[in-house]
């Protein structure tokens, strides 16, 4: 097929919930994607912060092939499978956590975390959840409710009861909402969809103290910022603060759908048999890829810390060059945003024409979330394409 045929058929047969760019991705190698018409793109989107190892990773290929040869892609959770167990062991070791629940997406991971918070609070009269303005936690009902952005609620009322919204990086606004009924605080340590906004050290430390003093759980949504993206295996490891629950997805399954709710000491032992489940959670094929990604995380995240600073500095240079169009570079590691004065979609379309994939975050931010294997050369190439796109707009 070609881009135009696939795009037309997609348009005719899909629901209209996405506004998609008119290309169809066919293959990939390393940092490069190729569409159905044979055009190549340097990829700084990574399937929205998913494809940590880029495309065609040899270890991922071997892991998947060996699962296919064993003949079992899925077992259900009636039984154990060694790939999912190994992934849980690796996660607990890397994070210093106690227990893992596997599911299939970020929204599902957050649903699990919210249910854990309410279950724990149920005997103590605690059911309220505090979340934050500009947050994003997914599209299921619990997840959109804790998403502090009106646009995701519009048309879908009523939301889940018992959710209140504080201001990000503003501890006083949290104090004003916290009380004996608070079951949990859910927060992205680096807000993604809201516009690439890092939490301050004092803010996260303050949340930790408030949760401790009010016997509430602290949930870090690391669906986007986890898994090596910020230069540590997990974003919280950049701070002197540990959550009680961490949620993961995106890069965890190496391109296959996989999410996880990860419980630390205080949140261990909440679920009992029958409390929660996901048919596909810990799916053999996804877990086999998770084992590969997790095994590479310590080394990869160290490299991301160095190259992320390089990317950030290059974005600062772009601001000096285009002060009328770009105003601020923010982020950590390979989760960087360039705040623009012009619509990000125009820049994205221009970059795509020139062979670079980038995406947006919030209304004004150009987002850079490349595969974690991106080199300085890849960064130079990407930034020079954005530079030339900004010059032409
Ligand atoms: C921080 C965060 N949480 C949750 C989600 C939802 O993940 P999923 O689309 O896998 O349900 C996202 C997706 O972008 C996210 O960025």
Image: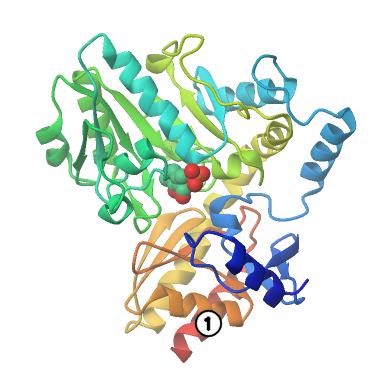
Above or below, 279 against 139 in this view is above
Horizontal side of residue 45 vs 342, given as left or right: right
Above or below, 384 against 156 in this view is below
Horizontal side of residue 329 vs 15, given as left or right: left
Q: In the rendered image, is residue 224 in sight?
A: no
163 vs 55, nearest the viewer: 163
The answer to which image quadrant residue 251 occupies is: top right
80 vs 33, nearest the viewer: 80
Q: Position of residue 160 (x, y in %)?
A: 28, 34
241 vs 28, nearest the viewer: 28
Q: In the rendered image, is residue 365 in sight?
A: yes
Q: Position of residue 73 (x, y in %)?
A: 77, 31
Q: Quadrant of the N terminus?
A: bottom right
Horizontal side of residue 244 vs 225, given as left or right: left
Above or below, 4 against 184 in this view is below
Picture residue at 35% right of the left edge, 36% below the top: 142
Picture residue at 69% right of the left edge, 65% below the top: 25
Q: Which residue is mark 1?
A: 350
The answer to which image quadrant residue 331 occupies is: bottom left
Horizontal side of residue 375 vs 244, given as left or right: right
Q: Give the residue furthest to the right.
A: 69
307 vs 373, nearest the viewer: 373
Q: Position of residue 18 (x, y in %)?
A: 49, 62
Within-10-Å neighbours for mark 1: few <14, some 14–19, many 20+: many
Picture residue at 46% right of the left edge, 67% below the top: 313
């Amino acid at each position: 097929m070609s881009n135009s045929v696939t795009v037309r058929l997609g348009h005719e047969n899909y629901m209209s919930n996405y506004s998609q760019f008119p290309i169809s991705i066919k293959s990939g190698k390393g940092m490069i994607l190729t569409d159905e018409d044979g055009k190549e793109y340097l990829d700084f989107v990574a399937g929205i912060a998913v494809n940590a190892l880029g495309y065609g990773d040899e270890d991922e290929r071997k892991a998947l092939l060996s699962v296919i040869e064993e003949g079992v892609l899925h077992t259900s959770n009636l039984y154990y499978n060694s790939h999912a167990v190994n992934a849980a062991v690796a996660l607990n070791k890397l994070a210093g956590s106690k227990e893992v629940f596997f599911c299939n997406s970020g929204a599902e991971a957050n649903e699990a975390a919210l249910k854990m918070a309410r279950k724990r609070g149920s005997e103590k009269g605690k059911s309220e959840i505090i979340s934050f303005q500009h947050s994003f936690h997914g599209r299921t009902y619990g997840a959109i409710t804790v998403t502090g952005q009106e646009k995701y609620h519009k048309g879908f009322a009523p939301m889940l009861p018992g959710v209140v919204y504080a201001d990000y990086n503003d501890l006083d606004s949290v104090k004003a909402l916290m009380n004996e009924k608070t079951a949990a605080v859910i927060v992205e340590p680096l807000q993604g969809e809201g516009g690439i906004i890092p939490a301050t050290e004092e803010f996260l430390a303050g949340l930790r103290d408030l949760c401790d003093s009010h016997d509430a759980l602290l949930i870090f949504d690391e669906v986007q910022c986890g898994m090596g993206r910020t230069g540590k295996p997990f974003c919280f490891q950049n701070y002197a603060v540990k959550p009680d629950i961490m949620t993961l997805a995106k890069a965890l399954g190496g391109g296959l759908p996989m999410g996880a709710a990860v419980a630390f000491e205080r949140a261990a032992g909440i679920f009992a048999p029958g409390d929660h489940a996901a048919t596909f959670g810990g799916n053999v094929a996804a877990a086999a890829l998770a084992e590969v990604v997790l095994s590479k995380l310590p080394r990869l995240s160290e490299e991301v810390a160095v190259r992320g600073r390089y990317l950030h500095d290059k974005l600062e240079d772009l601001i000096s060059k285009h002060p009328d169009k770009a105003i601020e570079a923010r982020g950590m590691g390979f989760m960087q945003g360039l705040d623009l004065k012009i619509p990000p979609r125009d820049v994205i379309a221009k970059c795509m024409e020139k062979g670079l994939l980038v995406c947006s975050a919030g209304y004004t931010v150009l987002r850079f979330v490349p595969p974690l294997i991106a080199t300085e050369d890849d960064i130079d190439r990407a930034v020079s394409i954005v530079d030339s796109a900004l010059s032409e707009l």
